[in-house]
Amino acid sequence: MNMKKFLYLLFAMFITVGLNACSPDDDPENEPPTEIPENPDDPDQPDNPDPNPNPDPGPNPNPNPNPTTGKTLIVYYSFTNNVHTVVGDLRTQIEADVIRVEPAEKGLDYAANNYAIGSALIQAIRNNPGNASSYPAIDPVEVEFGQYGTIIVAAPLWWSNMAAPLQTFLFNHGAEMVGKRIGLIVSSSSSGISGVESDAKRLIPDGNFLTPSLWIRSSQTSDCHSMIAQWLEDIGYTE
Ligand SMILES: Cc1cc2nc3c(=O)[nH]c(=O)nc-3n(C[C@H](O)[C@H](O)[C@H](O)COP(=O)(O)O)c2cc1C
């Protein structure tokens, strides 16, 4: 091999090695280790300089930026006292004011004749949900909504919907719950609760709903304590 060829070969080897060193690395094992700071937002962390010190905050995705301010209100209705029992347990776990909604017409048996009255009340709301006259009258309640940051609505399920008297309360006051944190607890024998969740969202259109809702079957009523404790943890409830 003459000198010219040798120099050429040396040059070619040099180029190949150099190119490989600069090419994108497909092998994740060779990627540089990425350090995850313990607190990415800590401005005191010198190794974590803010690449964009004046970012445009844009629209606030959370309409209730300080969710821990304000008291908690529990509002519920209960015909056969399952929800009442659940609320009684909830009150041993959090500090809250409580409103029990009562129908104006006393002594009705919503379950008689194969739930005929309850069924008719729900049907009337389904037929015309935007009209106040579709909702059964309830005893008047005075509420100062301004003092509450969180409202827990506890409802029996009737025919896949929220029990009618509680719908009346929310129809009357849902607009006053703008931006409040709304927690939903539903009691049913066996039916799933998505219809009740839809009712709550329709009646409190600007509520800041906490997820998940808590579904307690009638048969679980007496064992509800741990379900409630777990739910409060799941929704990040803080006082
Ligand atoms: C009018 C009426 C309709 C009901 N419809 C249903 C239903 O469709 N599915 C279901 O699982 N339970 C249904 N239930 C049962 C209740 O949801 C359940 O017993 C609940 O625990 C009642 O709560 P309360 O004791 O606080 O009133 C109905 C009860 C009533 C009174």
Image (tube, helix red, strand yellow):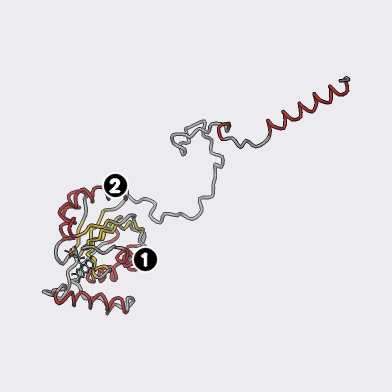
Type of the residue with mark 1: Pro
Q: CA distance from mark 2 to mark 1?
A: 25 Å
Observer-nearest residue: 228 or 193? 193
Mark 2 or mark 1, which has the lower sequence index?
Answer: 1
Q: Is 174 left, or right, of 118 in this rendering?
A: right
Q: Dot 1 surroundings within 10 Å: few (below 14), some, or many (20 or more)?
A: some
Say what secondary structure mark 2 lies in.
helix
Circle 1 residue? 205
Q: Is 69 left, or right, of 21 in this rendering?
A: left
Observer-nearest residue: 147 or 6? 6
Mark seen at residue 233: 2
The quarter of the picture where residue 179 lies is bottom left
Q: Is 88 left, or right, of 208 in this rendering?
A: left
The quarter of the picture where residue 158 lies is bottom left
Residue 236 vertical placement versus 140 (above, below): above
Find residue 161 and report its horizontal and vertical position in percent.
Answer: 28, 69
Residue 35 vertical placement versus 172 (above, below): above
Find residue 210 and report its horizontal and vertical position in percent.
Answer: 34, 55
Residue 61 vertical placement versus 199 (above, below): above
Q: Residue placed at 52% from the left, 31% from the top? A: 47
Q: How many marks?
A: 2
Q: Which quarter of the frame holds ligand 1?
A: bottom left
Q: Residue placed at 26% from the left, 64% from the top? A: 191
Badge 2 vs badge 1, beta-carbon distance below 8 Å: no
